[in-house]
Amino acid sequence: MKKIIDFFLAAAISFFFTGCGEDKTTLINGLKIDEATQKKIIAEAPVLTPQESIPAMKVENGFEVRLVASEPLISTPVALNFDDKGRIWAVEMQGFMPDTVGRGENIPNGKIIILEDKDGDGIMDDRKVFLDSLVLPRALCLIENGLLVAEPPNLWYIEINNDRAGKKILVDSAYAPGGNAEHQPNGLLRGIDNWIYNAKSAKRYRKKGDQWLTERTHFRGQWGISQDDFGRLYYNNNSQNLLGDYFLPALGAWNESQRSVAGYSVDMVKDNRVYPIRPTTGVNRGYREGELDSSLRLVNFTAACGPLVYRGGLFDSAYHENVFVAEPSANLVKRNALREKGYSTEGKQAYAGREFLASIDERFRPVNLHNGPDGAIYVVDMYRGIIQHRTYLTSYLKKEIEKRGLTTPLNCGRIYKVAPAGKTVKPVLMPHEPLALVNLLKDKNGWIRDKAQQMLVDGKMISVQPELRKYLKESSDPVRVVHAMWTLEGLGILQYEDIVPLFRHPNWKVRASALTAASSVINGDNYRRFAAEIRQIMERQDTLTAPYISFQLHCIGAFDQPMADTLWMDIAKKYPDNRYVADALISTIEKKENIFYKKIRFIEPDTNLAINRQFEKTLDDIKKNESGKNMAQLNAQYPRAAQVYRVVCRSCHGSDGNGIVSLAPPLNQSSWVTGDKRKLIAIVLYGLIGPVTVNNKVYKAPEVSGEMPGLLNSDELNEDDIAQTLSYIRRNWNNNASGVTKEDVLKVRQRWGNRQQPFTAEELKK
């Protein structure tokens, strides 16, 4: 296999240059690299300085890449925030994979640093360490006079005293309770609705006085999260280009029996093709047929992350609310264009056969993307040889790492920004005068609008309420209206009278935002008026906000359940074949699903109607969760297995074994789990590539990840660990199958040896 790949690699490099004609140099990012240097960069993956790495990039015509920070000022960055002075607060995850077995990963060498550009030339020249001695920190968020920091398993709030860490408050001791570094919550995005959202998580957070609120929300994504001007969230997983929500994030996550809610975690860009400009043999499953094309370049996403909705206002209007996605395994950044149709959104790749930004430098690892105060896109480059965590690191990739010396160095890292070529980009300092901040709510740069809202809320500047209410009444700009409304909400002074006129606003997004904000203002004095408004919305045939009024029936039910139930039935009768309305309605009736289903079937007996189909789906989910297992007893019987499941399996298959949307199928009541244990052992050791049928449903990419990686090469788990874990899942939830022994695992391993290729379902059936 090695000889074959080396042969094709040489051929691919030759092809790359012969395509350049007689010219022995190639123009990349406005600069020329000679042929010999290009060959060396591709074949050997040498460590390049930033000044050498930028010319190795090819960026969209009309743009240029500029250096913002590099080593020794910064090392292994994975995320950043900007403060009101335009300074960068960055997370350094220095402990990630020091070698191919992860030795030293638990050393507390992670840091939160502050970078500042003191001479105004656009390049950071000053570094302060705000917090050190962290183990694999992953996210941060500036709020009020402090900083949220995610350091698994904890989420901390640290007060800021003159750029020094002050009092440390534990916000959540179970922020990231398990999973490897690739599968733990991250993001900490301050949403327009004043809540903080995460990727790879079903929690949201909010600071209220000295208290921290934690609420359940929809499970979203894997690494990175972003929002549009309206406040809808976008995210992805490693094999899917872009996922996102049709509706605002605060809604519809109340019914724990509902496995998924229509309109959330939607596959928005179904094309997962990537177009590297160098051979990418250093991907985890590069040996697998179809993983690389004939020129040894990655075919589809394998490490998609860091999605960014561009809202900077610096680029041409055609780029507004395009979504950019990083792919560090292929050394590129993709651009996607979105199109709205009603409340739904779908997208496509902006180009055919090329990328917005790509590099021939294998160590260029874009892991996060951010809007900047100046309107540029900021690219967080971990600049690391190894980006695959040890849990799933294949022996094939280990050899690739060794061949090109990708293990070291461990102290590099860069931040770049992408801006229109030749355009002067000025640093931004936010004002602190309340009226000046209100005026910035209409700025063309979404980062500035968001920051202005946050500063008004954090500073408790309630003196600006007349100006904010003036925006609600007089502004023709929907974005300004929405920001003004959520600023009032964040200040705790939004009133019911503020949102009622917005229910009739000509822009449906404003109407939907006002309905979403109703949760903050509905009380015992005005809930009847709100119910009357819902009826008027129904009479106006406002189909775009129909899901929103359905989601918000719980606001009325808190004060008058019979009234809410009557409205529920009336909405269901009006929209019986709208699955978004159906799921929104079901989200409000936790533990009463059977009662309402009987009522619906009596008046709408057609089983093909969306309301009935969605009910059947939810009731089936409830049945799957009706397990009589004594989890405490099971965990005591298999303590190591419970830990392995929590760390390795839960992030994709869920704590209830029923799978996670867009990631993995269920283990609960799966014949692959409870059937022939030899097949199950083979899957866990060597992996499984889809499609696969579970409980009469076909699961395949992109609905779920296209492959379950095997654990054959894991240095963390031995045969006994695997046997215990398989016994654990075969007896968990609604499963009741025999156990698995260490000898069972050894027999399967001896049968298939060092096989690298994952199994297909068809192979296992034979």
Image (cartoon, rainbow, N blue to C red):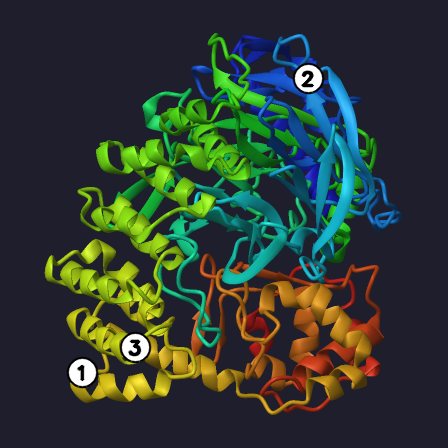
- Pointer 1 with pointer 2, Cβ within 8 A: no
Find the distance from the CA under tag 3 to the CA under tag 1. Answer: 12 Å
For label 1, the crowd category at 10 Å Cα-Cα, with few meaning under 14, some 14 to 19 and many 20 or more, is some
Would you identify the image quadrant in which residue 554 lies?
bottom left
Residue 543 to residue 365: above or below: below
Q: Quadrant of the C terminus?
A: bottom right
Label 1: state its secondary structure: loop
Residue at the (43%, 30%) spot, across then down: 449
Identity, as a three-letter code, of the amino acid under mark 2: Met
- Tag 3: residue type? Arg
The numbered mark, 2 or 3, whose residue comes first in the sequence reads 2
* 153 relative position to 622: left or right: right
State which mark lies toward you, 2 or 3: 2
Q: In front: 321, or 26?
A: 321
Query: Could you tell me if residue 344 is visible in this image?
Result: no
* Nearest to viewer (mark 3 / mark 1): 1
Which numbered circle lies on residue 124? 2
Quarter of the view holding residue 481: top left
Residue lying at 55% horizontally and 38% vertically, measured from the top left: 458
Q: Which residue matches tag 3?
A: 613
Residue at the location (55% across, 65% down)?
A: 664
Looking at the rendered structure, the secondary structure element under dot 2 is loop
Q: Amino acid at mark 1?
A: Glu
Kindly state the secondary structure of the residue where label 3 is placed: helix
Q: Which residue is mark 1?
A: 604
